[in-house]
Amino acid sequence: MKGFAMIKIGQVGWIEKEKPKVGPYDAVVRPLAVAPCTSDIHTVFEGAIGERYNMILGHEAVGEVVEVGSEVKDFKPGDRVVVPAITPDWRILEVQRGFHQHSGGMLAGWKFSNIKDGVFAEFFHVNDADMNLAHLPEDIPLEKAVMISDMMTTGFHGAELAEIGLGDTVAVIGIGPVGLMAVAGAKLRGAGRIIAVGSRPALIEAANFYGATDIVNYKNGDIVEQVMKLTDGKGVDRVIIAGAGPDAIDKAVKMVKPGGIVANVNYFGEGDVLPIGRLDWGAGMAHKTIKGGLCPGGRLRMEKLIDLVRYNRVDPGKMATHVFRGFEHIEKALLMMKDKQSDLIKPVVIIEE
Amino acid sequence: MKGFAMIKIGQVGWIEKEKPKVGPYDAVVRPLAVAPCTSDIHTVFEGAIGERYNMILGHEAVGEVVEVGSEVKDFKPGDRVVVPAITPDWRILEVQRGFHQHSGGMLAGWKFSNIKDGVFAEFFHVNDADMNLAHLPEDIPLEKAVMISDMMTTGFHGAELAEIGLGDTVAVIGIGPVGLMAVAGAKLRGAGRIIAVGSRPALIEAANFYGATDIVNYKNGDIVEQVMKLTDGKGVDRVIIAGAGPDAIDKAVKMVKPGGIVANVNYFGEGDVLPIGRLDWGAGMAHKTIKGGLCPGGRLRMEKLIDLVRYNRVDPGKMATHVFRGFEHIEKALLMMKDKQSDLIKPVVIIEE
Amino acid sequence: MKGFAMIKIGQVGWIEKEKPKVGPYDAVVRPLAVAPCTSDIHTVFEGAIGERYNMILGHEAVGEVVEVGSEVKDFKPGDRVVVPAITPDWRILEVQRGFHQHSGGMLAGWKFSNIKDGVFAEFFHVNDADMNLAHLPEDIPLEKAVMISDMMTTGFHGAELAEIGLGDTVAVIGIGPVGLMAVAGAKLRGAGRIIAVGSRPALIEAANFYGATDIVNYKNGDIVEQVMKLTDGKGVDRVIIAGAGPDAIDKAVKMVKPGGIVANVNYFGEGDVLPIGRLDWGAGMAHKTIKGGLCPGGRLRMEKLIDLVRYNRVDPGKMATHVFRGFEHIEKALLMMKDKQSDLIKPVVIIEE
Amino acid sequence: MKGFAMIKIGQVGWIEKEKPKVGPYDAVVRPLAVAPCTSDIHTVFEGAIGERYNMILGHEAVGEVVEVGSEVKDFKPGDRVVVPAITPDWRILEVQRGFHQHSGGMLAGWKFSNIKDGVFAEFFHVNDADMNLAHLPEDIPLEKAVMISDMMTTGFHGAELAEIGLGDTVAVIGIGPVGLMAVAGAKLRGAGRIIAVGSRPALIEAANFYGATDIVNYKNGDIVEQVMKLTDGKGVDRVIIAGAGPDAIDKAVKMVKPGGIVANVNYFGEGDVLPIGRLDWGAGMAHKTIKGGLCPGGRLRMEKLIDLVRYNRVDPGKMATHVFRGFEHIEKALLMMKDKQSDLIKPVVIIEE
């Protein structure tokens, strides 16, 4: 079968591999729609997770089941499914500790395009199908559904980690697709005012669509100062970091109130350390909690998010600014994420409707 | 001054009282808009909180400050304010325990029309103005603002007590104004499917407006059976009880999944006991948590809810189906809550705009 | 092989069955020590979970692995293990919801002597060995270790559900072995005053040993009145119910403060309903939360509890008042739980040291 | 009256000041016992909170009420009281947000020897006596009671912030008196294994007394490596930082498992930033939460901690290694905290028994 792969750090290309085989609990799926992720770009062009050779890329997909193992109960060939970016092994003690994302080791619940071949292929392998796949309802279009795998679960996890209360004022740093879903997630958790930090007009318009009430543009000066001015010097209740450099935590700590929470869902790709300002953090005593975590995956999470789309609580389709049709466009779509043009939010490749 | 009062159990009428006096931390407020509450009806006509003589009724108001005590810092005569139904004393140990609603004793944070005269008067007294009042922004109309005092904080508290997670399926039992705000609150916390239980067409239409995805009508049969059928026998993740008889908890326990939460914000007015079905509750072992509590009050809560209205997260004005203009209409508005006509959700009396 | 079984409701006896077979993820274990539980008595003599025929009893055991399936990684024949009373299937969506106790249905994580044969046999079957068994350290004697399976995890779960804060005043209703472990659990979570409700001198002495500071004896009058008197009318912060009749929840609600928690780990064996007093529950508004749940099982839980024994945080061996040696004493030990003599806390049968 | 004061940064001395006056809600207290704190040393000799002139030092005291304001209800002259280090104003919105420590601004709940004169004086002022003082039971000796004000509440807060679960493995970095109370707090919350990081023999002995199961000495090599070795490379569930330099958070993040919590109660006195290792923090996705906060104060907290001493849940008196008798010894006791001799844990000055 064909797949679009990381040949090595800095190089991508089409390769041939054998079609994957199923174990007793697994499934093989062919993609109906996929989307490239900024983290694919980090992986290939920045070597963010180290060297990989001939690894098929991609971890955002909806697809059709083509084969299942003997022990799979709830899925059969022909079923249309949402595939989460995070597909943990569930029979591991970390699951009993409540962190399936880290089952088998830190971040090891993330398998596609990290530990094993990803979804940019004619077929891909899904471990523990009953626990990781979710049925896709007929009435959700593919370009919406493919946002569930990673963008929605990641952005919303920012809002969850932030423990937003009804009416809270929330700042969201970064309004790429994950940041936009963090804005939508903050609204879904009942935030009042939502201050979105970004600069591209297409993203700002989308941020307003998803619930931002104020925009702070870093081109207009220090973002901390701008947020403090908007809030009459009080700061915000919560900050979600959804895209930024290593100084983002420090800035977030500065703009959050004592007792507030800084929640990170950004993948920090550079820098040895992430510094926290000692005095801004109250010399250790300010009750400014700093959290960060990989998005939840697995079947139940997907089912919950599918319900949010089905019942019109959120419309992730607005982010699909560039929709291609045909498997061969995966390459072009991926490279769009590298050279982000001004009107791009997220490219989607529809392989078959 | 004039006030509309409970003369005794079963009797209401206009009375004359002295204008209230301020202590050093207090304020006197004159109402700009008030709304009667079903609990006023319980208090007068069912004697639900025991006998009261010549007690002015009402606990839902926005008003204008007319006088403040010497130690009040943040409010001055002429300020327009939202007045919470719950105005606790804040210098009491229960506040340190996290339950201002019960400061000074169970439910003792509820003072208006319970422990002291209410807001259906030319003037009313607010204890600890800096901690209990909130400034009303210019751009929120009075008939929306008056819903904040009690309806929004109570209904939303149901959603808070229920600890709703993103995408959860939630049943709301009772869709009077508190139930409608419980539906809106469930949506604001990120519920997916929301099953509203009620029967009056005006309320059903409003429930759909506020976020209900399914309606269960008790006139069509047992509500537990209907909910189980809608959910393919799985039950719901959360139940909010916002109006019902003593058997509501039992029904809620029946329809909630193991591990789920039943959250009550209903004032149970009758029956010695509220029974829980032993087997439905897993003989004590089903992890079906039962919670219930008086709405939060105080200034910060009001400010948070004001933000939710200001930033269009919710539109409580839709509930104000009957708006009267003039102080003298308080009597008529109150009695409407007694003899609920089919198109009534909530009457509001605008005293001065 | 031989096993001591429930022949039918009301009748027990020794039976012959085939030795269990292992699936790929399973183990067969032979018991080294077992203990009978009051719930075995409920099951047989009260028919509490319905009819069962020739079902081997018992769910509290430590043992030696004799056979493992092909996919088991962390255990091999000869390993000494603690076996939890609750051995869920872990590949089920309820686990993703956080409630392994109810994986596959309400209470369905409880398999031994409920859904399948129990541990009172020459050999017993353990599903998903890697996820359910825990290695028994050499230096923990068997009569202590066998308390981990059920008594410790159940009693401690009462303390967990109660969300005890440092210095809280806690009442524990019922001081059989589960109640004693609830007392120990409350102490382990940092309770200040612990009021234990019971009457047998042997149990009272043990309650004091495990951390009770006050004893309330129901033979001396109404327990609610006694608790209120001890607390100067204030009531307690938390109540754990660890053994009582259907009126226990009502009594617990009466004695707990507004904002408090009632946590049940008792198996309610009788009565159609468990009533809550309407007014004691603040007519629905007192913030008196009522929780109840089956004990956690699985490997990680056992490992955590093993550490508590190993590091001398608790000494459950004190409860083993009657220790028998020899497989054949299982019958006698079980019947002791039926006809509880005054100095009995818990009988243990050591099969092989 | 006489008081021992910070004359300016780097200089201490006895000064004369007027006896404080009470407002209507306040009390004047004379100390019966006081203890100096390392933070007094930071304040004077490192200028950690900036310049202060002629400010009386000290914030750990038990005393006798000598005068109360007209509105004080629960205390009268002659009452013996525990005085918390943190005495917030309670009528401030931060209290409604749940963070009395920051009422009026970040850390502003800490008044003694920071915002106003401290307790090393013949008399000192306590704001809001009913909300901040707690009655001292007769049977608790002064040298134990004085540990409640700050050492117990601070160390225990580390255990609270760490959200320790039953049987968790916890590392405590720093075993001065706060660290010792963090060890005791971890034990009180039900930790299994407790690894204490320190080096002085007197402190190590005390750490073992309070519940440490393992000692890691930084003189024997990198503490992260030692902790990882002790835990077979798995790391710990929780870390409490109770004394260390700016690299402590980074080390704690390294040794904690994914999904774990790092809780800081240390006052970081130096360095512009506290760095977090990017990769150790999972590039932002490891779910390693970092928290830190000033100890809780106020009356209810003191009452809870008093109960823990009264009911023998902890014996803080073991830390009082050097007990002086007489007001004049305050100077000597304070300077002992500067030049810590090898057998010192905590000096106490008994002024009157």
Image (cartoon, coloured by chain):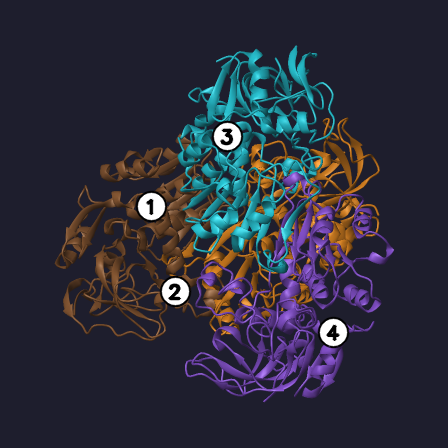
Chain colours: A cyan, B brown, C orange, D purple
Q: Mark 1 and mark 2: span between their CA atoms? A: 24 Å
Q: Mark 4 and mark 2: span between their CA atoms? A: 41 Å
Q: Which mark is residue B131?
A: 2
Residue A163 screen position, x and y as percent: 51, 47
**Horizontal side, residue B87 vs residue A148: left or right:** left
Name the amino acid type tagged 1.
Met
Task: Tell me the mark number nearer the camera, choosing from 1 and 2.
Answer: 2
Q: Which residue is mark 3?
A: A303
Q: Mark 3 and mark 1: span between their CA atoms? A: 26 Å
**Horizontal side, residue B103 vs residue A135: left or right:** left
Task: Tell me the mark number nearer the camera, choosing from 3 and 4.
Answer: 4
* Res C311 visible: yes
Name the amino acid type tagged 3.
Glu
Q: Secondary structure at mark 3?
A: helix
- Whether discs 1 and 2 lie on one chain: the answer is yes
- Residue drawn at point x = 52 percent, y = 24 percent: A341
Q: Which residue is mark 1?
A: B181
Residue D279 screen position, x and y as percent: 70, 40
Marks 3 and 1 in Cβ contact (< 8 Å): no
Q: Secondary structure at mark 2?
A: helix
Q: Which residue is mark 4?
A: D337
Q: Mark 1 and mark 4: span between their CA atoms? A: 58 Å
| Label 2: few (<14), some (14–19) or many (≥20) C-alpha neighbours in 10 Å | many
Q: Mark 3 and mark 2: span between their CA atoms? A: 43 Å
**Quick check: A293 above or below A60?**
below
Residue C285 screen position, x and y as percent: 39, 57
